[in-house]
Image: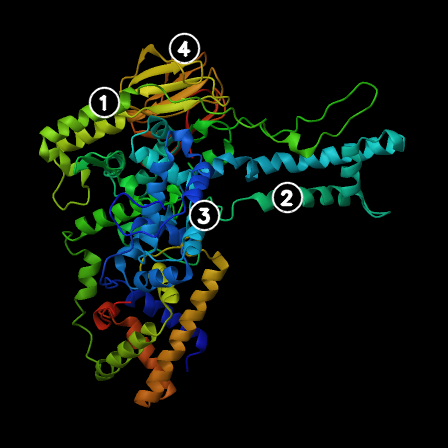
Amino acid sequence: MTTDRERDAAVDRLLGAALRTPANAPGACPPADELAAFVEGTLSAAERDAFERHAAICARCHQALAVIGSTEPLADTRRERRAWLAWPALRWVVPAAAILATAALLYVAVQPPATVPQKTAEMAQATAVPAGAGGGGEHAAVDTRVAARLKASTPAAAPAEVLSRDESRERTADTPVMSRRIQPEPPVLAAESRTAPKGEAAQNQAVPPTAGVVGGVSAPPGRGIVAAPLVQALPAAPPPPTAADQAQKALVDAVQFKARVAEQPQAQVVARPAAAAPVAPGAFRLAESVVIAAPVVVASPDGSTRWRVESGSRIARSRDGGKTWEVQAFRASTDLLAGSAPSPDVCWLVGRNGLVLLTTDAEHWDVRPFPERADVMAIESRDAKNATVTTLDRRRFVTEDGGATWTIR
Amino acid sequence: MVKAATGLRTPPIDPALAERLHRQAGAARWDLSGEDFAAALSRSAAGRFRDPDASPREVAAYLESLHLEDLAVAEACARGRESAWEHFVTHYRPALLAAASWCAPPGSAHELADSLYADLFGLEERDGARRSLFDYFHGRSSLAGWLRAVLAQRVVDRVRETRRFDPLTETQAAVSAPDGADAPDPDRDRYLPMVRAALAAALAGLLPRDRLRLALYYTQQMKLAAVGRVLGESEATVSRKLDRTRRDIRQAVERRLRDDHALSDDRVAACFEYARTDPAFDLARALPPDGG
């Protein structure tokens, strides 16, 4: 006689076969904003129930949820402004705060009680440990307080960075194409937003490793170390954004493109990608020009220096935060798609057919040798030596020598 | 009271509330006037509240729960504000391209991202006004989440369009053509319909959320963590609930086979084995959609 466990396993295999081709639910699928709200948990209870009733038996909704579940969240600008709360910053802040607290306690121990600064006294009181407790308790108390305060401010639904492995599942050769697609790890592009809290170009840059280091400790003469308030240990707020450019060539090009579209009806097929008719090759190229016309804009961490890609291959630079622009002499051989500027003088730009450009003086561009002719879609960089790029086919290449050599990850 | 410009009957919005939300959203940063932002709020409220007589408190609570900053960016982009577009291009476009390359069928990522971008910009005109896909963003989720959902739906539609014309794969052909070399088993022909019906009834009796979780895991072959991401559950919770659902289904099927068909335990075990090894078992054919 079979056991319950064996029958559960039989049901598992049964369901795997039985649910392979679910029927479509009648009626319209929920729109994208409802789908997104469901995933983010912002639907009301009644709306969520209605969504689940439909989605439970709708193949299209299953597939859309599968795509969403298997892809990394896009950059969230709200999280960028609070990115200093993210784990990479926390890694610096917590031990730095522990060191501060220890220094504060030592200072208090060697100073007469009357000379203890107010802040230090507060911190000492907050981290006071019972007599006989070890040094680890002091660090733990500070860690706990800091972690609790930061956790209270952290956004509620931080997305997972990578897919965890469910090694109990076996993938077979007849796994549907869409499902196979979710197995490799996705490019961790959204991590850029978690490590780059500064400025509007946080999407395209990485925070230097020194960001977040406590800078608030000062040493007034004759007073030893004064522990600065915790808030000073955090990175300075980014400068306020400057006013937008008077006219962007990209939008002018797009308006001109629109005029051309009006004269060529077949190109409008591109504007309706859900149409069953195949897209004419000419229409695709026209649509591509809209995206290329819209500039890639990369800003240095302090926002003072910006680079803008115009018409896909020309590079313009601003040294005054975007108020004025000058087109640089260098012209790329193909379309540039993304960039990263870890400092005002260093900028990486990447594009089609393995194009990787680097400038270390904000002026002259050098074409870096890239091992493949794949379209390079994204880049993260730490400085002029270290960068990671992601190609269209989701492979990641890393360089530690300014692009002279690359290692695939 | 603020009313939508679209002609829809929308719940009225207190102007003071609209003004406060305008400030909270930082809409002035994108040169978006209070009136324009209020129109976006009205559209959002109209989508949520079918009844224009919804209580002001309910409407206010809903509007305050929106992703206001993202709504301001989207509305400003829809109205062609350059500052907003610069912000969007800087923050969202590269990730959109990368997400499309990740989830789109091979060779179509760029076209998919380009066409989505073109729709966001608004190449179509209707009644003299440019129509942007941003008009359909109502702030109920983050702008990033909405973009991901739009992209996902387009990817799915594209795959479904092309799959309609795909020839039967070898695996499918093997499944559909039973092996004629096996000797016919009379019990199999008798018990399989029983199992089908019992399993169909058990599935129909599941809570929608449990059924959705099951479908994502089995039909989409999603990993536990990915299922948890879309359902807002931890991986451990997903695993536990799947186990519980499987157990409930198994017990329901056993109960039905014993009670309705008076089968012994041995016969019930045999039923499970028949169903497990039957290549043509397809619940979708046995279970018509119930319309939710």
Give above or below for A295 relative to A190. above
Q: Nearer the viewer, mark 3 or mark 1?
A: 3
Residue type at numbered disc 4: Glu
- Give yes or no for contact between labels 2 and 1 (Cβ–Cβ under 8 Å): no
Inspect the image, locate mark 2, and give the three-letter code of the amino acid beneath it.
Arg
Q: Quadrant of residue B68?
A: top left
Query: What amino acid is found at the position of numbered circle 3 in the picture?
Result: Glu
Between the C-alphas of marks 3 and 4, the distance is 47 Å
Q: Nearer the viewer, mark 3 or mark 4?
A: 3
Q: Is residue A105 left or right of residue A65?
A: right
Residue B292 spot, x, y in % from top left:
29, 67
- In which quadrant of the rendered view does residue B207 lie? bottom left
B96 versus B14 height, above or below: above
Specify whether disc 3 shares its chain with disc 2: no
Q: Which residue is label 2 attached to?
A: A149
State the mark number for residue A253.
1
Badge nearest the viewer, 3 or 2: 3
Q: Residues within 10 Å of mark 3 (few under 14, many from 20)?
A: some
Mark earlier in primary sequence (2, 1)? 2
Q: Which residue is mark 4?
A: A363
Q: Earlier in the sequence, mark 4 or mark 2?
A: 2
Q: Secondary structure at mark 3?
A: helix
The foreground one among A350 and B182 is A350
The residue positioned 45% from the left and 66% from the top of the image is B241
Q: Which mark is residue B64?
A: 3
Q: Is residue B213 depicted above or below B33 in this figure? A: below
The quadrant in which residue B58 appears is bottom left
Circle 1 sits in a helix, a strand or a loop, which is it? Answer: helix
Determine whether, in the image, residue A263 is placed left or right of residue B150: left
